[in-house]
Amino acid sequence: MDAIVIKNVTKRFKKSTIRREYTTFKSELVRWFTGKVPKSDVTSHIEALRGVDLVVPKGKTVGIIGRNGSGKSTLLKLVTGIYTPTSGTVQVNGRISALLDLGAGFHPDFSGTENIMINGIILGMSRSQVKDRMQEIIDFSELGDFIDEPVRTYSSGMFMRLAFSIATHVDPDILIVDEILAVGDEHFGRKSRAKMEEFKKSGRTILLVTHDLGTVQNWCDSAAWLDGGKVRLFGSPDEVVAQYRQAVALAEASGRPLIPSAISADGGALPSTTATPQPIGGPSPANGRRMGDYRVEIHQVRLLGRGGEPSALFDTEGAFEVAIDFVAREAVEGVGFRCSLVRADGTIVYTTSTFAEAVPLPSPLPDRGTIRFCVDRLGFTQGSYYVDVSVETAAGMVCDSHHGLYPFSVRSTGGDGGIARPPHRWQFDAVARARAAAS
Amino acid sequence: MIRNLRELYRYRALLWNLTQRELKARYRGSILGFMWTFLNPTLQMVVYWVFFSVLTKQAIPNFPYFMFIGLLPWICFSSSLLSGTSSISDRRDLLTKVRFPAQVLPATVIASNLANYILSLPLMVGLGLVLGVAPTWHAVFFPLILAVQLLLTLALVYFFSALNVTFRDLQHILGNVVTLWFFLTPIGYSVTQVPESYREGLLLGNPFAAIVSSYQAIFYRHESPDPKPLLIVAAGALCLLWISSMIFEGRREEFAELA
């Protein structure tokens, strides 16, 4: 059975509630006397969702991505039952626990313990159930003595700890999280991720809204891209994220104003990427690690060591070269290359481009060619790295970009560490003074 | 209406907890704390006592006791009405962030005011004993009158709280109406002092006048309350509760968007 089934859901808000937040006595009087209905009352609606279909299978983790104002939070509020759909149906099978906002329903003057009780009951537990879990929740939140202090004295991180602890300990079948984990510190962030992992393993459903695309790729079983009030793409996280990134890049490059989608007539959808040109050669773009319009393609990237030999293992003190073979399918003006050296954990050790260093290149490029990024002494410490390369125009339009495709390792001689080994030497200056004289 | 009340029953644990929290929050941070439950009506009574007996030369024996009988239910009723009206529009944090049964909010206000009323009753009885008025068997009618009062309060609060979400002026208008209402209700004076020609109209037109004079009948005059006005009020309140439940249910979906 599916945990959440959303069928052709639309949600409309009255615009007047946004423009003049409340109906006032004065405005009502004016309306009666003039007998006129203000224009905004009849016509203007905000369409936050325009026909959303989404099925979240039981036990799966689904990430929702999309621009600000694309309807993500509205969708979550419909799923949790805070809003009711204007049309269409939302079917939820199982008990929901939602973390939509920090400390929703917390009473500032009450202690953490008292708030756990009230929030637990709001989330659908009985008093005795909350009492049974009270200690567990307090332990997980790691608030210590603060649990007896009024929550108005809490920092935002402590708020989040309490809210997260309650929401994950009420035994929900479906957990809904709206961009909140970012608040916790390193330690609690790890802990809450572990808790979510435990949730996944125990076969529960998680619905996640986030702008952290890495989280979606690493975490979710599938992803939904919400755009212009509709689900634009539903599928594997890698693919959805790649398409989303590309559409945003296209929109930025074309200079389109990125207005919130709900208030524009066409839903303000991002430019289409469906007519994506396919590259002729080079690695497959299917896994989301390659994208661009392929007017200039990178067909091959070779990592070369000493003497120009292809290699995947380099010495700290050795030479390093990235050879990029390109094919220009169109005569594109002002094209340059970018090369980034990235550590396996995502830290960019160095990134540069032909633009940044004003490297003279022919414009337009010849049909075929090779550009080399040559390093005489690599200087990286021992570890795993990869190379990212791209071809782009001066305006930032990406012609071809290869991300995470070319790994290499660095071996080092000594027990040094860190990221880079700058050229260095040790020097010792002896102090020419006898120890006895000092004492 | 039945659905509304049933749902209220389903969320009774929440209602109970929120009421507790409301009662605790009310006096949290004040030095006298819970004593204010007794001090507030007493001080208010003293003010009115001075006003009514000294300035208007009232001739009601045991006036403080008489005054208390009407004043306590009035405080319960009027503060329920005033804070109940804004109870939904004030709690947007709850309604927009979690799925929350909206009808619990006005009910919480009423429940906590009711608790205050019940808790201050010993004060009234004690005052009566000091002044030499002991309660008689007529007090058995008390739950009945209280039920009518609650029915009326619930009906009005549901009605106003649902409307106040879109029409915020209501809470300010009501504040003034309630002040006027107090003086139109025989709390500081007796119904018998009202000219005969107006009396019927007052008792029928002002539902709370019927309730207060029933309280006065059982506690002060030691007689059975006049059933006719009480029944009319009960029937009217039931009708109103039915209507306001419908309005409440109908508007409920908008609460999260407008609150």
Image: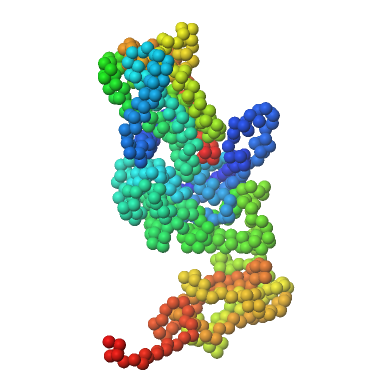
Q: Is residue B216 above or below residue A421?
A: above
**Residue at image location 60% in from the left, 53% down from the top:** A227
Q: Is residue B141 visible?
A: no
Left or right of A415, for residue A318: right
Q: Residue furthest top?
A: B196
Q: Position of residue A39 (x, y in %)?
A: 68, 37
**Residue at image location 50% in from the left, 86% down from the top:** A318
Left or right of A365, for residue A433: left
Pick whichever, B164 or A375, lies toward us. Answer: B164
Pick whichever, B153 or A202, lies toward us. Answer: B153
**Residue at image location 46% in from the left, 19% down from the top:** B183
Q: Is residue B235 above or below residue A26?
A: above
User: Which quadrant of the figure contains the C terminus of chain A?
Assistant: bottom left
Pick whichever, B32 or A29, lies toward us. Answer: B32
Q: Is residue A95 above or below residue A321?
A: above
Q: Is residue A320 above or below residue A180?
A: below
Q: Is residue A259 visible?
A: yes
**Residue at image location 33% in from the left, 29% down from the top:** B38
